Image (cartoon, grey):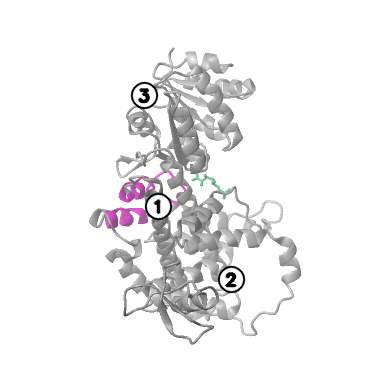
Amino acid sequence: AQANIGVIGLAVMGSNLARNLASREGNTVAVYNRSAEKTHTLTSEHPEANFVASETIEDFAKSLQTPRTAIIMVKAGAGTDAVIDQLTKVFEPGDIIVDGGNALFTDTIRREKAVKETGIHFVGAGISGGEEGALKGPSIMPGGSAESYETLGPILSSIAAVAEGEPCVTHVGTDGAGHFVKMIHNGIEYADMQLIAEAYDLLRKVGGLEPAEIADVFTEWNQGELESYLIEITAEVLRQTDAKTGKPIVDIIVDEAGSKGTGVWTVQNALDLGVPVSGIAEAVFARSLSSHREQRDVSTNLPGPSNPWTVSEDDKKGFIEDVRLALYASKIVAYSQGFDAINAGAEKYDWNIDKGAISKIWRGGCIIRAQFLNRIADAYDEQPALEALLTAPYFTEALVRAQESWRRVVAGAAGAGIPAPAFSSSLSYYDGLRAERLPASLVQGQRDFFGAHTYKRVDTEGTFHTLWSGDRSEIEAVDTH
Ligand code: 6PG
């Protein structure tokens, strides 16, 4: 046995991760793929990697030094279970199986429980950064036992992205914690992308800017507090022209957004956890709305407002700054909601998640990487038990600075009939949090009226019910929520 680490599943993510591993000092990488053809392609195209290739799972296991460590990089789902099944037959107690796919964290919890019975460690690790990240340095979010992280930590640290001198990997928590946090990462990714898309839409439809000009605006924004990978690549996409027509590529691409499901999982789980991730949810819904072509086709006749929103040349600069601040404020809300979901998940599944460490490993390698994450890390450093990220002084100050612009943009968009669901739901969330009284008291009254669901009083301990169909006097009641 020569190899210290193995990779199973050699599609582009697996191949790139294997090449990344092989490029690091001290690693010898075993590779295996269900069809041998992919293995041959990888080994022949990359002789420099000195891969140890196997055509059977038995040989793959033999080629690994014990305790064996193998990373599965197959499409999440039934294929993952099949590979785990094969591996548990040829691995021994103490060996480590890592699932580097985008698995649903509850599947990871189930798998970890089952694999543990055999004495083998199972680690679900979220890996972010796409194809390039896998090759050059991703952000890695491993769960699983602390014991397995002792072996795995140094290997993963060697291939992870480095941000300000620190590798973008940390032991997130036990069993499914890593995949849970990766799921939230993707939810935030959806929100970030939607917010940027809404900013673009307003700059174009209200500001009258062309895609290439908007690209310049984003490039400029990328120098400031919005600096991030997603802003950077947005500028690149907007600058791109179609070779066939010469038009901006953004005008040629069909406006129906796809998704592979991780954003939906974030929202589904947040609903179960009772966490209002409204910005993330709007981003998911905006993708669904875009892809309901039939409904959109019949809806183009729906009337819009009579007054368009236009800005004069003189006001353009101010308008662009308003949109920038609306984007920044909404982004703070999305991250705050994402971290709330991490908190709630940690509590429900009994994980000890260091949120400061999570924000640090998101500074490099992953899709949402940004300078901004340093501020989140600072906030959790200062107050580890921070209730809501947006109440940290740095963010509150930013929201104070942004709010007039944010309100102008949301109000303007509504007036002009331009959809800005993530901008506006984030603002509503902000106003909901800061409201002294919410109309939830009326909802409680309605619930008590039709279902005797009871309510609490602002002035007296206990649970109450009004005899709505009787003499409308109030009685003390059993709490039924
Ligand atoms: C990452 C990405 C990655 C993938 C998304 C795309 O962190 O590297 O999130 O996991 O590109 O799953 O998601 P959608 O296809 O759902 O947009």
* Spot occupied by residue 14 in the image (x, y as percentages of width and height): 53, 31
The reply to whether the C-beta atoms of the residues labelled 1 and 2 are less than 8 Å apart is: no
Q: CA distance from mark 1 to mark 2?
A: 29 Å
Q: Earlier in the sequence, mark 1 or mark 2?
A: 1
The residue labelled by disc 3 is 25
The residue labelled by disc 2 is 419
- Above or below residue 111? Residue 475 is below
* Spot occupied by residue 97 in the image (x, y as percentages of width and height): 46, 27
- Above or below residue 287? Residue 476 is below
Confirm whether residue 463 shows in the render: yes
Q: Nearer the viewer, residue 60 or 159?
A: 60
Q: Does residue 378 show up magenta in the picture?
A: yes
Q: Earlier in the sequence, mark 3 or mark 2?
A: 3
The disc placed on residue 129 is: none
Task: Residue lying at the far left in this picture: please name it.
Answer: 382
Q: CA distance from mark 3 to mark 1?
A: 35 Å
